[in-house]
């Protein structure tokens, strides 16, 4: 292979890798997510468009409604179209309950949001992973158009963009450093994290380093391990009373064990 062809292939590979690691939702140009005069996500519903999730209010139909309003940001970005949050998100800890954007990232990354307050009332824009607030910006410190940036250093996560009260106009969202692949609804995601079932309570487990150990398995069982984003990362048939397996990365996992006696769901924290 000559040097010119090799250089061209390497250049193409670098471009493809860069594109795979950057995701941009620009509401100025993305008419798929935010068509003109979009009234908002209907109350009590959610949607996922181009891997960006939107979770609406319980009854109001105006989350992510489209409106116009020219803004110029500190990095030179200019836009006249925005998605309006139209109210607070009623968060429990770092997990919003309504009026929020969400998406799943494959690993560590930087999340950037271009936003503007909808009016002068006090409010704060936040970015979280559902467990930790990664960044926040009160409008009292950022009047007018501003840019909020957060670093996710916790690996594969579901990321949330929301506000405490009132609302912001969102002009653009960008993810750098990880692949975005959002397919699971919030309803299914919350169901996956539900660890309330108590059948098969005799089964014990512990985690050491990146190895998971289970014992007291009475009968042949199926073990499924999911990442916090809902991706299946491990599938195992347990045919003995004890089983162990390794996980490649640290983080939060959901283990579901099932057999003819019932099922057990376990939340695993791998450090």
Image (spheres, grey):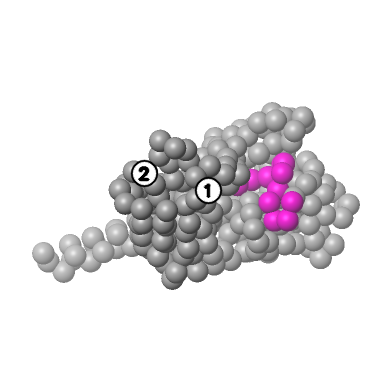
Q: Helix or strand or loop: what does disc 1 sit on?
A: loop
Residue in the foreground of this view, choosing between 219 and 180: 219
Magenta stretch secondary structure, dominant: loop
Q: Which residue is mark 2?
A: 219
| Residue 181 visible somewhere in the drawing | no
Q: Residue at x 51, y 58 (%)?
A: 268
For residue 170, side relative to residue 250 (left or right): right
Tell whether position 93 is magenta: yes
Q: Helix or strand or loop: what does disc 2 sit on?
A: loop
* Number of residues whose C-alpha sits closer than 10 Å to that of mark 1, classed few (under 14), some (14–19) or many (20 or more): few
- Whether residues under marks 1 and 2 lie with C-beta atoms below 8 angstroms apart, the answer is no
Q: Disc 1 to disc 2, how far (Cα)? A: 14 Å
Which x, y percent locates residue 132?
65, 61
Which x, y percent locates residue 115?
70, 53
**Above or below for 134 versus 198:** below
Which x, y percent locates residue 125?
74, 56
Residue in the foreground of this view, choosing between 176 and 264: 264
- The magenta stretch is 92-102
Is tag 1's residue or tag 2's residue first in the polypeptide sequence? 1
Q: Residue at x 42, y 57 (%)?
A: 214
Residue 223 shows which numbered tag?
Answer: none
Residue 201 shows which numbered tag?
Answer: 1
């Amino acid at each position: 292979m000559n040097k010119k062809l090799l250089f061209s292939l390497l250049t193409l590979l670098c471009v493809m890798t860069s594109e795979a690691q950057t995701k941009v939702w620009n509401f100025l140009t993305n008419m798929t997510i935010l068509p003109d005069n979009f009234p908002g996500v209907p109350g009590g519903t959610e949607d996922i468009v181009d891997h960006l999730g939107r979770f609406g209010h319980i009854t109001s139909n105006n989350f992510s409604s489209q409106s116009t309003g020219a803004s110029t940001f500190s990095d030179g970005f200019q836009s006249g179209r925005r998605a309006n949050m139209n109210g607070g998100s009623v968060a429990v800890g770092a997990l919003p309950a309504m009026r929020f954007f969400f998406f799943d990232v494959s690993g560590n990354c930087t999340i950037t949001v271009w936003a503007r307050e909808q009016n002068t009332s006090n409010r704060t824009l936040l970015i979280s992973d559902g467990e930790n607030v990664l960044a926040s910006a009160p409008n009292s410190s950022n009047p007018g158009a501003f840019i909020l940036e957060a670093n996710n250093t916790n690996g594969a996560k579901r990321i949330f963009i929301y506000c405490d009260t009132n609302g912001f106009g969102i002009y653009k969202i960008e993810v750098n450093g990880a692949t975005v692949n959002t397919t699971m609804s919030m309803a299914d995601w919350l169901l996956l994290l539900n660890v309330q079932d108590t059948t098969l309570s005799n089964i014990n487990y512990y985690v050491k380093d990146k190895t998971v150990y289970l014992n007291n398995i009475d009968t042949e069982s199926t073990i499924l391990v999911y990442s916090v984003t809902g991706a299946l990362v491990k599938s195992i048939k347990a045919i003995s009373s004890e089983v162990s397996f390794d996980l490649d990365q640290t983080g939060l996992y959901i283990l579901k064990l099932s057999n003819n006696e019932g099922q057990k769901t376990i939340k695993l924290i791998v450090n």
